[in-house]
Amino acid sequence: MPQLNGGGGDDLGANDELISFKDEGEQEEKISENSSAERDLADVKSSLVNESETNQNSSSDSEAERRPPPRSESFRDKSRESLEEAAKRQDGGLFKGPPYPGYPFIMIPDLTGPYLPNGSLSPTARTYLQMKWPLLDVQAGSLQSRQALKDARSPSPAHIVSNKVPVVQHPHHVHPLTPLITYSNEHFTPGNPPPHLPADVDPKTGIPRPPHPPDISPYYPLSPGTVGQIPHPLGWLVPQQGQPVYPITTGGFRHPYPTALTVNASMSSFLSSRFPPHMVPPHHSLHTTGIPHPAIVTPTVKQESSQNDVGSLHSSKHQDSKKEEEKKKPHIKKPLNAFMLYMKEMRAKVVAECTLKESAAINQILGRRWHALSREEQAKYYELARKERQLHMQLYPGWSARDNYVGGYGKKKKRKRDKQPGETNDANTPKKCRALFGLDRQSLWCKPCRRKKKCVRYIQGEGSCVSPPSSDGSLLDSPPSSPNMLASPTRDSKPQTEQTQPLSLTLKPDPLVHLSMMPPPSSSIVLTENSTSKSSGLPASNCQNGALDHQSATLQQSAPSSSLLAQPSTSSLHSHNSLAGTQPQPLSLVTKSLE
DNA sequence: CGCCCTTTGAAGCGT
DNA sequence: ACGCTTCAAAGGGCG
């Protein structure tokens, strides 16, 4: 998808979002209404204002409503199933669940509406939201240098991006640092405005904002009390006091982080939100080279672009010195993309809801959820990601993803797995044995997998890589994350925002589901997830999956995979339904053979 | 200790 | 232009 982006992704922007949406929802768009991309985005963004309403309709909200009682603690105790299975089971409960009283993080309403007690926003909240989107008025100014670079490399019209972001509908005066401000204040500002900030004055209008009600949570997780605890939100941001969020290393970059930026309160708040206070080193007396910011990691992994090193690093010819230098260089991480932001935000919730802690499993769940998100919801994250990139760009003008790219020769390759390109993406591509069967069922793994403990790739007919007896569902809903399987279908079925966003929408069609889900769309999710969860035949996940009727769930679960794989189209949905009813056969792997 | 797993998206690299 | 690869987060699993 990203490739589609004509700009090459440099544009930071809207394009990406649009495209991604387009791609993912290609069918959807055709089916539903092929509103122009621009319009979509615009709508999405403008609609964000009324997010509360939207959210209420969204599955998430309903999910919230349906959130079952506290999860059972048993999950962990159970024999550990495959990540996938675990994910599925856990996933079942993800969408449900009442607000967690003790939950450490506060989520912003618009994004996490579903998790709000009532799924509704207080008037204030709305106000807050309304102020959210005036962001994209990015002033090319500070970005120019960097963007110039980018432009040089790629034709992508960064400037256009900044200007074009439809979101710009805000009439407000734009502060030079607007991007940051909006980014931070409006997007990330915690419910409690930073102490240093004059109450809540709208940077643009100068009019004091209504204080954010406590219930309004920051976009990014932020410990409720932490804000106050932090002497100065900027503490770690401001050079004098500490380190910029995206610290600028002495020698790291040609253009040190603009003072203005550092001073920018909003920025700080953003940063603090982006990188929650708890992440901030307790002592704000961080030296400039310190690595207080999560984005900057002590370079175990050195940064390669020597060009970044300014004089500070005497490009000594000695390796030792080089190493030292390298060590000195902070590792500036890539800005988080939309999904990463989403994960970051939601992971805690997922973890909280499920006892499951394995990131792999959780990520699977998150991946599904991501697909289940409505465009609007995703748009938010895309937008955030865009800003993130912008911010990152501003902070590290000279930084390039290349700096962290270790694919080159002689580089310590961090290569993880030798997965075939598109392996995960390929709908046809089965899950890896480990993912499929889990550690507990290694007997089912294919030989290579067993030997290596690491699944190379599922080979049809090979070894015992057979679809799990009852766990059929596993495969099927197995990482629907695989775009082909779920993503596209999902999108297809997903009619725009209004529609609920059950995890695997494709699975929804089940008549049963409809019946039960009539009221709140979310219910569908519940069903699906339940089905999946129980697919393994394991006890319901502790993630509160009990709600669903097991039988229906069971039926459902088996079918989807086949339908999905065979036909990742809306039609599949229906077929699947029928199938589900009549033929509860585990097709997980079988499907593959079909192809 | 360090990589793997897992997810999506962005971006670099190679052809 | 296209496709593949790497890296972002995260934390348990595993050699």
Image (cartoon, coloured by chain):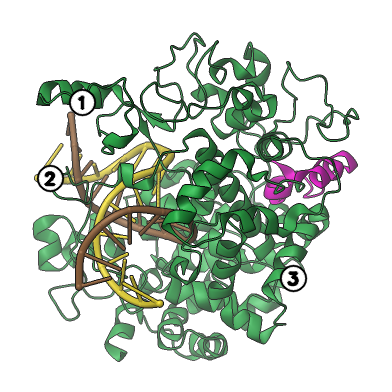
Chain colours: A green, B brown, C yellow
Residue identifier under label 2: A410
Q: Residue at x 59, y 23 (%)?
A: A262
Disc 3 sits on a residue from what chain? A
Residue A237, above or below A448: above
Residue visible at 63% across and 24% down? A260
Percent coordinates x, y for residue A19 in the rendering: 56, 69
Residue at which label 1 appears: A315
Chain hosting mark 2: A
C-alpha span from label 1 to label 3? 51 Å
Give the class, few, some or many, for how many residues have Cα within 10 Å of label 1's Cα (few <14, many ≥20).
some
Residue type (three-letter) at the residue carrying disc 3: Arg
Find the distance from the CA under tag 1 to the CA under tag 2: 18 Å
What is the crowding at mark 2: few (fewer than 14 residues within 10 Å), some, or many (at least 20)? few
At a point 69% along the width and 55% down the height, the residue shown is: A163
**Mark 1 or mark 2, earlier in chain:** 1
x and y percent of residue A359 in the render? 39, 46
The residue range painted magenta reads A108-132
Closer mark to the observer between disc 1 and disc 3: 1
Work out which quarter of the rendered image holds the C terminus of chain A and state it: bottom left
How far is disc 2 from disc 3 in space, using C-alphas? 47 Å
Seen in the picture, residue A178 relative to A425 is either above or below; the reply is above
A116 drawn magenta: yes
Task: Give how far across and how far down residue A146 sits, in percent.
Answer: 50, 43
In this rendering, which labeled residue sits more in front, label 1 or label 2?
1
| Residue A282 is one of the magenta-drawn residues | no
